[in-house]
């Protein structure tokens, strides 16, 4: 069965869509996936053993996105089923223009107009559940069991126990805890763990700040990989970690896919919807404030108390509660 899957754009969202993809693979016979998505989502998920084709969607860069979407649809051709985990008009158009009859997507004005199956999905539940409800709306058996996150990139094997530090969050500054506090936590555990600093191309300066703070604290057993890894290398390195300390971010969900013990620091985002999914060793550090979760990229009140109030001591205590 040929199934077209339009992946979410963000790395974390794409990883959270993997249980839904696994359900599709196990529900239908002889599944062959074609994945369409952003560069990061394709790089993370193209290794699936059922992935027949992986296409980076560059239609947004075109002078006429409608025309580019039409051309992409005709290049893709017709499928037995098409599923979109995105919620925009161009994704709905892409599914419709392939000529595929059975098309699944979250209910919206454009999906209702263009597609065959558009379930109304409650947003006050974990995003993994939301994606699975979209994927399984046409399945005969609705009593399905949702599994863990799944990536098919082989994790590295480090010689020593390794602590991963991820201070970035692509969504915005409001989700980011402070570099000096990450350094303080890492320094506390330096005798037990080697340390890796993670970060994307736009987070190099933040990682450098962590590095400088580690040096001031006398820490030598670290390496800084910020801006130096592609998506496959990022996943492989995170998968090899023995402990991960992170903001709410794409790498946090990568760590969950590899069942890496994790302490996740949440501020403006809703932990009930985007926390780690089915990670046996996972702790959340957050403060309940009247203004949170505000879901803003930057603190609208300019005080950032949801993150500023979280101390290094609290994060260290959460690590100890994991009993590693």
Image (cartoon, rainbow, N blue to C red):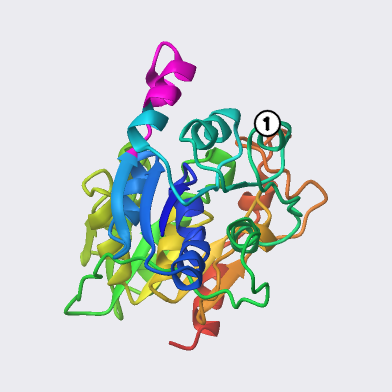
| Residue 286 is inside the magenta segment | no
| Residue 63 is inside the magenta segment | yes
- The residue segment tinted magenta is 56-71
Q: Would you say 124 lies left or right of 3 here? A: right
Which residue reaches farthest top?
63
Which residue reaches farthest right?
290
Residue appearing at x 32%, y 40% in the figure:
55
In the rendered image, residue 309, in percent from the top left (x then y), is placed at 66, 55
Counting the numbered discs, the total is 1
Q: Would you say 56 lies left or right of 170 here? A: left
Q: Nearer the viewer, residue 93 or 170?
A: 93
Q: Would you say 275 lies left or right of 259 here? A: right
In the rendered image, residue 131, in percent from the top left (x then y), is placed at 59, 57
On the rendered image, what quadrant is the N terminus found in? bottom left
Q: Quadrant of residue 90?
A: top right
Q: Nearer the viewer, residue 208 or 212?
A: 208
Q: Quadrant of residue 61?
A: top left
The residue to which callout 1 is attached is: 110
In this rendering, does residue 153 appear at all? yes
Residue appearing at x 38%, y 43% in the figure:
206
Which residue reaches farthest left?
159
Q: Would you say 46 lies left or right of 37 here? A: left
Disc 1, SS? helix
Q: Nearer the viewer, residue 93 or 61?
A: 93
Residue appearing at x 25%, y 70% in the figure:
155
In the rendered image, residue 193, in percent from the top left (x then y), is placed at 29, 76
Magenta span main SS: helix
In the rendered image, residue 47, in percent from the top left (x then y), is placed at 28, 59
10 Å crowding of disc 1: few (<14), some (14-19), many (20+):
some
On the rendered image, what quadrant is the C terminus found in? bottom left
In this rendering, does residue 168 appear at all? no
Residue appearing at x 60%, y 58% in the figure:
274
């Amino acid at each position: 069965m040929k199934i077209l899957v339009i992946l979410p754009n963000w790395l974390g969202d794409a990883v959270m869509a993997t249980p839904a993809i696994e359900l599709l693979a196990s529900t239908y016979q002889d599944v062959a996936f074609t994945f369409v998505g952003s560069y990061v989502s394709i790089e993370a998920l193209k290794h699936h053993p059922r992935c027949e084709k992986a296409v980076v969607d560059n239609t947004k860069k075109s002078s006429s996105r409608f025309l580019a979407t039409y051309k992409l649809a005709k290049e893709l051709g017709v499928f037995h089923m098409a599923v979109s985990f995105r919620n925009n008009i161009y994704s709905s158009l892409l599914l419709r223009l392939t000529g595929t009859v059975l098309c699944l997507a979250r209910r919206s004005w454009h999906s209702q107009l263009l597609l065959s199956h558009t379930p109304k999905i409650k947003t006050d539940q974990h995003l993994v559940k939301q994606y699975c409800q979209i994927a399984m709306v046409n399945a005969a058996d609705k009593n399905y069991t949702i599994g863990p996150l799944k990536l098919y990139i082989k994790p590295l094997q480090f010689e020593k126990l390794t602590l991963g530090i991820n201070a970035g969050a692509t969504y915005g500054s409001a989700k980011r805890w402070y570099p000096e506090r990450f350094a303080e936590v890492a320094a506390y555990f330096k005798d037990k763990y080697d340390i890796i600093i993670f970060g994307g191309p736009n987070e190099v300066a933040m990682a450098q700040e962590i590095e400088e703070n580690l040096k001031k604290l006398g820490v030598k057993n670290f390496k800084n990989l910020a801006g130096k890894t592609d998506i496959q290398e990022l996943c492989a390195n995170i998968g090899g970690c023995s402990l991960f300390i992170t903001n709410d971010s794409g790498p946090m969900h990568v760590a969950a896919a590899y069942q890496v013990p994790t302490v996740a620091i949440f501020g403006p985002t809703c932990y009930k919807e985007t926390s780690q999914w089915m990670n046996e060793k996972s702790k959340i550090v957050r403060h309940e404030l009247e203004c949170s979760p505000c879901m803003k990229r930057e603190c609208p009140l300019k005080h950032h108390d949801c993150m500023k109030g979280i101390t290094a001591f609290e994060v260290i205590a959460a690590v100890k509660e994991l009993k590693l």
